[in-house]
Image (spheres, grey):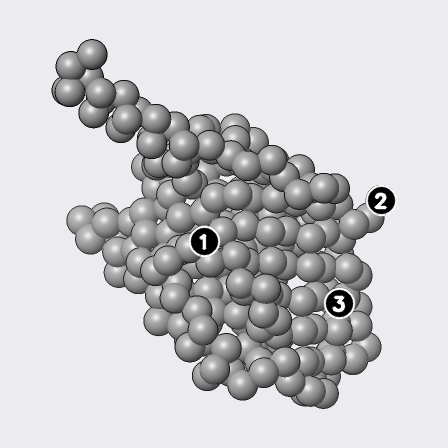
Amino acid sequence: MSSRRVVACLALAFALAASAVAAPPEGFVSLFDGKTLDGWDGNPTLWSVVDGTITGQTKSTSQLKHNEFLIWKDQVEDFELRLKFRIEGGNSGIYYRCRKDEKAQDPLIGTQADFDGSGKWTGVIMEYLLRGILAPRGQKVVIDEKGNQKTVGTVGDPAKLLAAIDVTKWNDYTVIAQGGHVVLKINGVPQCELDDRDPRRIVRGWLGVQVHRGPPMKVQFKDIYFKDLTK
């Protein structure tokens, strides 16, 4: 075999290895096959599969006027979601239990596990277009039956939690939502915790990921595993 063919075979082997999807952890199912966007719905000019990752990318030549989403085919209620992410610039997030409004500028409205290129929003629970910030990074928050928010503790110093995360590299993001109790973890470290007793909270809804309007950005996801906690 010629050296050129050997190099080509090695390149193919490395490409296949990079795109391979590991088996889900016990009790989880995979939401991404590593090759296609089967099961997901979004604008194909923004969302694609690149090198075995779900990739959302915007360009300076056509800046978005509103946020865009890649939405999973099924609604979710109580669950644990694990995925890997990285981001270059801009803002993104993992939206869950969201309302869908195709007529609105932003078709998903509801709660997100936030992250962004600057770090300002990383590890924050935000209810987009509804109640706003529900739990900042580093805080344990209770929202009572009247919608009043109260910080009742911490999970760590916000600056130190952020300093341990490099969003340009692969990071593990975990979202655990059972009833009104939600915990966000990045790389296994709790970022915030929420006890939401507000009757206005959305109990069940859509799951999706986001590219944000504004300057050009690129966000990628892989190893997306989901466990239904309602069973």
Residue bearing mark 3? 181
Task: Tell me residue 148's x, y (percent).
Answer: 72, 83
Badge 3, how many Cα within 10 Å: few under 14, some, many 20+? some
Residue located farthest toward the right when viewing the structure as drawn: 231
Callout 1, which amino acid? Phe
Q: CA distance from mark 3 to mark 2?
A: 17 Å
Nearer to the camera, 179 or 184: 184
Q: Nearer the viewer, mark 1 or mark 2?
A: 1
Q: Is residue 176 above or below residue 126?
A: above
66, 40: nearer the viewer: 40
Instruction: Tell us which disc is closer to us: 1 or 3.
Output: 1
Amino acid at circle 3: His
Residue 22 vertical position relative to residue 143 in the rendered view, above or below: above
**Which residue was labeled with disc 1?**
85
Image quarter in which the N terminus is found: top left
Asked whether the residues under the numbered discs 1 and 3 touch, taking CB atoms below 8 Å apart as contact, a structural biologist would say no
Q: Which mark is residue 114?
A: none
Quarter of the image that includes the C terminus: top right
Residue type indicated by callout 2? Lys
Q: Could you tell me residue 41's position as x and y percent?
A: 50, 35
> Which residue is at a point 56% across and 44% down the rendered structure image?
224
Tell whether 41 sits left or right of 143: left
User: Which disc, if any, is residue 231?
Assistant: 2
Dot 1 surroundings within 10 Å: few (below 14), some, or many (20 or more)?
A: many
